[in-house]
């Protein structure tokens, strides 16, 4: 397990994963673009460091020598996932990341055949995006094998990290995404709202372009998929406003100004905030006859969960649990995988 390389190791979520690894006596290899940012952590814990960018696939592949698994924590993943995955295929190294971006899932899915031939597993989304929701989707498919529509929703109790906030900002003006008839369909931002009971009464949610719109199709083959997120009125208003002011929100000037504000804040929730946080998920499937099945899943705060699941999947992969090709978490580890983590419960409504 000392052959696990964590790329983007100086980031907030990577730090949580590294601390978890060290607590288990495992020393992952730290990697990223900046030696100055990696050095303090490496020196403090006696960890190996590899410094490299992703511009040259051959050079990146050479830097993966002796590595069994890459866990990519360097977002936005729209910039890092594809070049790292390509290098992993060339080097014969399994690829994992913690993305939630639909475009990333779709891009890596297209590389699945090439990865399978190379004996390499590509599994993006090994964190809160999308392990719990993917397992919930697979469970619902198991409950209703003839389902034709899937709706997922989540309520995250906690604060976003800088990386999450940056990714949300960069995608806010790009609209939403749902799946219809097996095809991805672009829709306006917050195209629909829905009151959903996560277990403590109805909460207003809005439709968002969450990763499961891509991954749940691979995991379940359900043709119609939507994902909703619990959102306060201000966020729903901002999402709807982006339909009309997308060009302004997406401009380099506005993006730069808001990113400066994001960077001025904390890297992410502290230990106490993670302890007090929680994640509530809800899912429902419907068949052609109009029958439905509904389930809820409750688990720990999103970043805490991401550290747990991403590191666990990295360990399992390093020990030989990998399946060559493009895979989702539930495809490899099953619908009940998420229930193995403390603080997680699931009920069928």
Image (cartoon, rainbow, N blue to C red):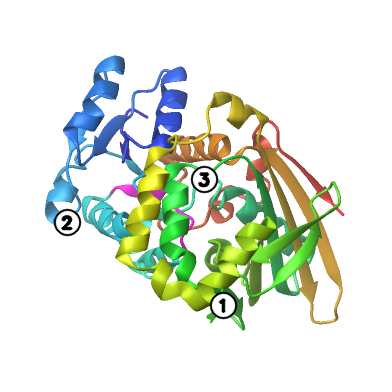
Disc 3 or disc 2, which is closer to the eye?
3
Mark 3 secondary-structure assignment: loop
Residue at which label 1 appears: 188
Magenta span of residues: 93-101
Quarter where residue 194 is shown: bottom right
Q: Pick whichever of labels 3 and 2 is earlier in the sequence.
A: 2
Position in image of residue 21 (x %, y %): 43, 25
Instruction: Please tell me which residue lies in front, 193 or 97.
Output: 193
Q: Is residue 299 above or below residue 226?
A: above
Residue at which label 2 appears: 57
Q: Give the side of residue 92 with respect to residue 14, left or right.
A: left
Mark 1 secondary-structure assignment: loop
Residue at which label 3 appears: 127
Asked whether residue 98 is drawn in magenta, I would say: yes
Question: In the rendered structure, are the residues bearing label 1 and label 2 in contact, judged by CB atoms less than 8 Å apart?
Answer: no
Disc 1 or disc 2, which is closer to the eye?
1
The 10 Å Cα crowd at callout 3, few under 14, some 14 to 19, many 20 or more, is many
Q: CA distance from mark 1 to mark 3?
A: 27 Å
């Amino acid at each position: 397990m000392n052959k696990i390389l964590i790329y983007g190791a100086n980031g907030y979520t990577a730090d949580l994963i590294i601390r978890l690894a060290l607590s288990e006596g495992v020393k992952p290899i730290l990697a990223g673009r900046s030696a100055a940012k990696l050095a303090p952590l490496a020196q403090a814990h006696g960890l190996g460091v590899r410094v490299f960018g992703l511009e040259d696939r051959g050079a990146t592949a050479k830097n993966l020598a002796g590595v069994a698994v890459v866990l990519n924590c360097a977002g936005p993943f729209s910039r890092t996932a594809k070049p790292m995955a390509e290098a992993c295929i060339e080097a014969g190294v399994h690829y994992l990341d913690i993305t939630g971006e639909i475009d990333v899932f779709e891009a890596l899915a297209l590389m699945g055949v090439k990865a399978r031939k190379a004996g390499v597993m590509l599994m993006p989304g090994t964190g809160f995006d999308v392990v719990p929701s993917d397992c919930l989707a697979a469970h619902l498919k198991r409950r209703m094998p003839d389902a034709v529509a899937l709706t997922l929703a989540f309520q995250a109790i906690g604060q976003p990290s800088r990386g999450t906030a940056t990714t949300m900002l960069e995608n806010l003006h790009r609209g939403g995404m749902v799946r219809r008839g097996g095809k991805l369909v672009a829709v306006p931002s917050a195209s629909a709202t829905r009151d959903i009971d996560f277990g403590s009464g109805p909460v207003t949610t809005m439709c968002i372009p969450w990763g499961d719109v891509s991954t749940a199709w691979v995991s379940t083959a359900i043709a119609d998929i939507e994902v909703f997120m619990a959102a306060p009125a201000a966020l729903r208003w901002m999402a709807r406003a982006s339909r009309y002011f997308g060009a302004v929100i997406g401009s380099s000037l506005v993006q730069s100004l808001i990113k400066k504000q994001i960077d001025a804040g904390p890297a992410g929730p502290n230990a106490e905030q993670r302890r007090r946080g929680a994640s509530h998920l809800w899912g429902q499937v419907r068949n052609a006859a109009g029958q439905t099945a509904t389930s809820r899943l409750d688990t720990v705060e999103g970043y805490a969960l991401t550290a747990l699941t991403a590191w666990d999947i990295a360990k399992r992969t390093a020990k030989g649990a990998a399946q060559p090709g493009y895979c989702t978490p539930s495809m490899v580890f099953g619908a009940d995988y998420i229930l193995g983590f403390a603080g997680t419960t699931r009920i069928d409504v």
